[in-house]
Amino acid sequence: MNDLAARISNLRPSCGPVRLVAVDGPAGSGKTTFALRLAEELDCQVIHSDDFPVPWEEGPGGWFHALESQVLRPLRDGLPGGFRRYDWVRDTYAEQVAVPPAPVLIIEGVGTARASVARWLAYSVWVEAGEAVRLRRVLERDGAALEPRWREWFAAEEEWFAADRTRERADLVVTT
């Protein structure tokens, strides 16, 4: 992880003054764990797709507009960004999260390395695991009652990633 952090630190800024790093891949693959370890090495902020409300029926693409308009565009222009974090347990918006221009920012979650913002990314990581492993992980985290929804989500992700060709554009592929 030290080598990766050093490589990213030596890249040119990509989104205004920020080196924007995306950690993408399907649900349950280990993106959050990877992003948090990398952030520790880089001493930087992580924004999670789970910080935004994502209606199941909108699939992987439905949440990103908020991140793009409230965080990425301001950073691209050298300005601070920010957003209100969504609290999934309470089903309401929670605290305001400031996102100042910094040397590195990690965005983590399904759809963060999408083609539409590839020009703003300094580096992208694709994290993957087998479907059985991913399903076990999400059900352990969220409960077995959600299995039908997760199976639908997995199918939507597969379609999304195939159309977007996210994995093909990744600078690094990590299997967990």
Image: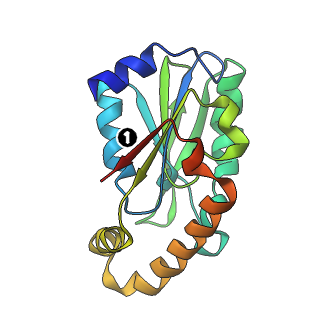
Q: Nearer the viewer, residue 21 or 129?
A: 129
Q: Badge 1 local density, few (<14 within 10 Å), some, or many (20+)? A: many
Is residue 43 at least partly visible in the picture?
no
Q: Nearer the viewer, residue 41 or 171?
A: 171
Pointer 1: what residue?
35
Q: Nearer the viewer, residue 48 or 88?
A: 48
Residue at 72% x, 21% y is 77
Is residue 170 at least partly visible in the picture?
yes
The single residue placed furthest to the front in the displayed view is 168
Residue at 49% x, 29% y is 105
In this view, 19 is above or below 162: above
Residue 103 at x, y = what percent? 49, 17
Image quarter of the N terminus: top left
Colouring convention used in this rendered image of the protein: rainbow
Residue at 46% x, 13% y is 10
Q: Is residue 49 left or right of residue 5?
A: right
Q: Is residue 143 left or right of residue 92?
A: left
Describe the element under mark 1 as helix, strand or loop: helix
Res 39 → quadrant: top left
Residue 110 at x, y = what percent? 53, 55
* Count of numbered marks: 1
Residue 115 at x, y = what percent? 69, 45
Res 55 → quadrant: bottom right
Please state which amino acid type lies under the numbered disc 1: Ala
In this view, 133 is above or below 62: below
Q: Is residue 135 left or right of residue 122?
A: left
In this view, 162 is above or below 73: below
Residue 89 at x, y = what percent? 40, 66
Residue at 32% x, 75% y is 139
